[in-house]
Image (cartoon, rainbow, N blue to C red):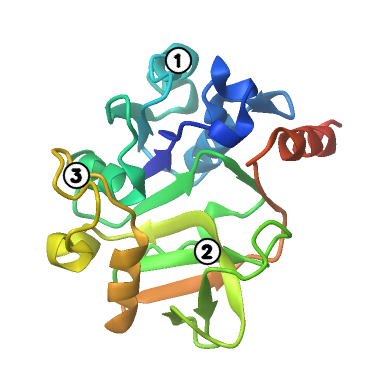
Amino acid sequence: MKALIFAAGLGERMRPLTNTTPKPLLQAGGKPLIVWHLEKLAAIGVTDVVVNTSWLAEQFPEALGDGSRWGMRLHFSYEGPTPLETGGGMLKALPLLGDAPFLTVNGDVWTDFDFAQLPRQMHGDAHLVFVDNPPQHPTGDYALLDDGVVRPEGERKLTYAGIAMYRAALFEGWREIIGAAPGAELSPPKFKLPPLLVAAMARNAVRGTHHTGRWTDVGTPQRLAELDASLVP
């Protein structure tokens, strides 16, 4: 199995910490946030991990090497000085990810979710992990129904955890789906992933899992400090 770690963000809300260090390389519990993911990915047998980069991109291979310390191969997908957003970044990385379903995780989250719970045999084009809505995002993102189907709207919307399984087929017809969205005309294109997910939901091609354990969106220096303190033995 292959995986993609989103690590290209500018980390603007984390300044001044991210003035000199990209957010996924900030430390919590004695190691960089991205290393927590790499260890968990290695534990379930992931052999190749693509890390998309932009801000301070040169620091990632310097800090992580080629992945051999975790028994995997690391590949770096550089997006240029301006990140391509989630959709554009994933599209650019697809040649490195192949046609089989692949795992994705945001480089700026921390969780005790076991990646082994993600389906190896997928139904549809995406399988998303959700968490209860945190204080900073009280309205949630999508509705997870009792049968595991995901809808754009519903009685109780949950927050996307930044962890998922995808098929490359999600991007079929992506230009028609996003239309004239700003950045779509660029090469490589820059666009967000949610419009493709909503289109997939319309054809019943998105499923989900509700994780009720620990999860943190490390979006501010305060949340990073709180996470770090909670991980100290």
Residue 210, percent across and down?
Answer: 60, 70
Label whose residue precedes the other's in the sequence (3 or 1): 1
Q: Name the residue beneath numbered marker 2.
A: 129
Classify mark 3: helix, strand or loop. Answer: loop
Q: Which residue is mark 1?
A: 59
Q: Is any part of residue 121 visible from this angle?
A: no
Label whose residue precedes the other's in the sequence (1 or 2): 1
Residues at marks 1 and 2 touching, judged by CB atoms closer than 8 Å = no
Between residues 35 and 172, which one lies in front from this camera angle?
Answer: 172
Instruction: Give the foreground label among 1 and 2.
Output: 1
Q: Amino acid at mark 2?
A: Val
Q: Residue at x 37, y 63 (%)?
A: 194
Compared across the picture, whether 72 is left or right of 25 comes to: left
Q: What amino acid type should be assigned to the residue bearing mark 3?
A: Pro
Residue 121, image x, y percentages: 35, 68
> In the structure shown, which secondary structural element does the residue marked by tag 2 occupy?
strand
Q: Nearer the viewer, mark 3 or mark 2?
A: 3
As measured in the structure, the alpha-carbon distance from the residue carrying label 1 to the one carrying label 2 is 29 Å
Q: Based on the displayed image, in which of its 4 quarters is residue 36 positioned?
A: top right
Q: Are the residues tagged 3 and 2 within 8 Å (C-beta)?
A: no
Q: Which residue is mark 3?
A: 189
Residue neighbourhood size for the residue with mark 2, other residues' Cα within 10 Å, grouped as few (<14), some (14–19), many (≥20): many
